[in-house]
Amino acid sequence: MSIFSKIISGAIPSYKIAENETFFAFLDVFPLRHGHVLVVPKAEVDKLFDLPESTLSQMLVFAQPIAKAIEKVFPCNRVGITVIGLEVPHAHLHLIPINSSNDLNFTQPKLKVTEEELKAAQERILNALK
């Protein structure tokens, strides 16, 4: 069972942003930028392009309002989307507020964020989703 499956099941706590019967979105606790959200299918599939076509296309539709909410509440030029998939064997998208392409550089150090900062980011995004 992947760490993401444990988060989805509630065995590991998370800062949930959105959920439906197919997907789960939550804050990355090791973000590149404040407001970095992970979008994960509930079905544990290792590689993004191994997902069924319908799930793959629905994933972007599920992510769209989340990306728009992030863009509203975090200063950025846009919300970047990336798929790395090397750190957790469970398909996922990264939604990251960016001002330059370097903001999506996963070789740079991650932010050190507090629980209070994560709760505040979660609240800001949730309020923007309303």
Image (cartoon, rainbow, N blue to C red):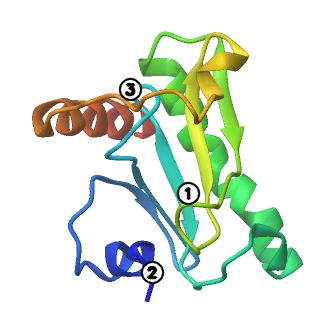
Q: Nearer the viewer, mark 3 or mark 2?
A: 2
C-alpha gap between disc 2 and disc 1? 14 Å
Residue 34 coordinates in the image, percent (x, y): 38, 26
Q: Residue furthest left?
A: 116
Residue at x 62% of width, y 10% of height: 99
Residue 67 coordinates in the image, percent (x, y): 59, 36
Packing grade of label 1 (10 A; few <14, some 14-19, many >=20) is many
C-alpha gap between disc 3 and disc 2? 24 Å
Residue 128 coordinates in the image, percent (x, y): 41, 31
The quarter in which the C terminus is drawn is top left
Figure quadrant of residue 9: bottom left
Left or right: 14, with 105 as reference point: left
In this orientation, which residue lies closer to the viewer: 102 or 45?
102
Left or right: 46, with 106 as reference point: right
Vertical arrangement, residue 48 with respect to residue 64, above or below: below
Label 1 sits on what residue type?
A: Val
Label 3 sits on what residue type?
A: His
C-alpha gap between disc 1 and disc 3? 16 Å
The answer to which of marks 1 and 3 sits earlier in the sequence is 3
Residue that carries the numbered disc 2 in the rendered image: 2
Packing grade of label 2 (10 A; few <14, some 14-19, many >=20) is few
In this orientation, which residue lies closer to the viewer: 47 or 61?
47
Figure quadrant of residue 111: top left
Q: Secondary structure at mark 3?
A: loop
Label 2 sits on what residue type?
A: Ser
Residue that carries the numbered disc 1 in the rendered image: 39
The answer to which of marks 2 and 1 sits earlier in the sequence is 2
The quarter in which the N terminus is drawn is bottom left
Q: Secondary structure at mark 1?
A: strand
